Amino acid sequence: MVGKIIILFVIYTAILVYDVRKWKQVSVRERFIYGALMLATVYLSLIYVMDKSWLNLNDLINFLFSEPAKRIVESVKAPI
Protein backbone atom coordinates (compact mmCIF):
# COMPACT_ATOMS: atom_id res chain seq x y z
CA MET A 1 0.00 0.00 0.00
CA VAL A 2 2.85 2.38 0.76
CA GLY A 3 4.33 1.76 -2.67
CA LYS A 4 1.03 2.63 -4.33
CA ILE A 5 0.78 5.84 -2.32
CA ILE A 6 4.31 6.86 -3.28
CA ILE A 7 3.62 6.23 -6.96
CA LEU A 8 0.40 8.25 -6.86
CA PHE A 9 2.14 11.05 -4.97
CA VAL A 10 4.81 11.26 -7.66
CA ILE A 11 2.22 11.21 -10.44
CA TYR A 12 -0.01 13.88 -8.88
CA THR A 13 3.01 16.05 -8.07
CA ALA A 14 4.14 15.88 -11.70
CA ILE A 15 0.65 16.73 -12.92
CA LEU A 16 0.29 19.70 -10.59
CA VAL A 17 3.78 21.06 -11.31
CA TYR A 18 3.03 21.00 -15.02
CA ASP A 19 -0.47 22.44 -14.71
CA VAL A 20 0.23 25.24 -12.21
CA ARG A 21 2.12 27.21 -14.88
CA LYS A 22 -0.90 27.15 -17.19
CA TRP A 23 -3.53 27.63 -14.46
CA LYS A 24 -3.71 31.44 -14.74
CA GLN A 25 -4.28 31.34 -18.49
CA VAL A 26 -7.37 29.12 -18.53
CA SER A 27 -11.00 30.15 -18.27
CA VAL A 28 -13.37 29.39 -15.41
CA ARG A 29 -15.08 26.69 -17.46
CA GLU A 30 -11.79 24.92 -18.10
CA ARG A 31 -10.92 25.12 -14.39
CA PHE A 32 -14.26 23.56 -13.52
CA ILE A 33 -13.73 20.72 -15.99
CA TYR A 34 -10.17 20.20 -14.75
CA GLY A 35 -11.41 20.05 -11.15
CA ALA A 36 -14.11 17.54 -12.03
CA LEU A 37 -11.61 15.32 -13.80
CA MET A 38 -9.20 15.56 -10.88
CA LEU A 39 -11.98 14.56 -8.45
CA ALA A 40 -12.69 11.50 -10.59
CA THR A 41 -9.01 10.54 -10.67
CA VAL A 42 -8.65 11.01 -6.92
CA TYR A 43 -11.69 8.78 -6.33
CA LEU A 44 -10.31 6.07 -8.61
CA SER A 45 -6.88 6.44 -6.96
CA LEU A 46 -8.46 5.80 -3.55
CA ILE A 47 -10.03 2.63 -4.90
CA TYR A 48 -6.62 1.59 -6.25
CA VAL A 49 -4.72 2.32 -3.04
CA MET A 50 -7.18 0.75 -0.62
CA ASP A 51 -8.07 -2.25 -2.83
CA LYS A 52 -11.77 -1.64 -2.25
CA SER A 53 -14.57 -2.86 -4.46
CA TRP A 54 -16.37 0.48 -4.62
CA LEU A 55 -18.26 1.64 -7.67
CA ASN A 56 -15.97 2.39 -10.58
CA LEU A 57 -16.40 3.62 -14.13
CA ASN A 58 -17.37 0.19 -15.46
CA ASP A 59 -20.24 -0.03 -12.99
CA LEU A 60 -21.45 3.43 -14.01
CA ILE A 61 -21.33 2.56 -17.71
CA ASN A 62 -23.14 -0.74 -17.12
CA PHE A 63 -25.83 1.04 -15.10
CA LEU A 64 -26.38 3.68 -17.77
CA PHE A 65 -26.17 1.60 -20.93
CA SER A 66 -27.03 -2.04 -20.18
CA GLU A 67 -30.81 -1.71 -20.44
CA PRO A 68 -30.78 0.41 -23.65
CA ALA A 69 -28.27 -2.03 -25.17
CA LYS A 70 -30.54 -4.98 -24.37
CA ARG A 71 -33.48 -3.18 -25.99
CA ILE A 72 -31.45 -2.48 -29.14
CA VAL A 73 -30.36 -6.12 -29.40
CA GLU A 74 -33.94 -7.32 -28.93
CA SER A 75 -35.25 -4.95 -31.60
CA VAL A 76 -32.61 -6.01 -34.14
CA LYS A 77 -33.04 -9.77 -33.65
CA ALA A 78 -34.61 -11.56 -36.57
CA PRO A 79 -37.89 -13.30 -35.81
CA ILE A 80 -37.69 -17.07 -35.84
Image: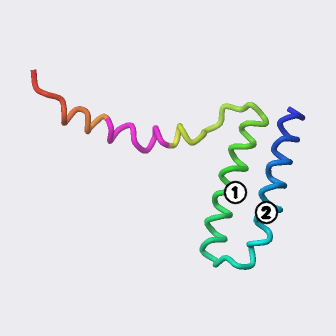
Of residue 53 and residue 23, the one placed in the foreground of this image is 23
Q: Is residue 41 left or right of residue 18?
A: left
* Image quarter in which the C terminus is found: top left
Residue 49 in picture, x, y percent from top left: 78, 36
For label 1, the residue is 38
Dominant SS type (magenta): helix
* Image quarter in which the N terminus is found: top right
Mark sitting on residue 18: 2
The residue at the far left in this view is 80
Q: Is residue 14 left or right of residue 60?
A: right
Q: Is residue 60 above or below residue 73?
A: below
Q: Amino acid at mark 1?
A: Met
Residue 61 in picture, x, y percent from top left: 48, 42
Kindly identify the residue that appears in the image at 62 percent across and 71 percent down: 30
Report the magenta residues as a range: 61-69
Of helix, strand and loop, which one carries label 2?
Answer: helix
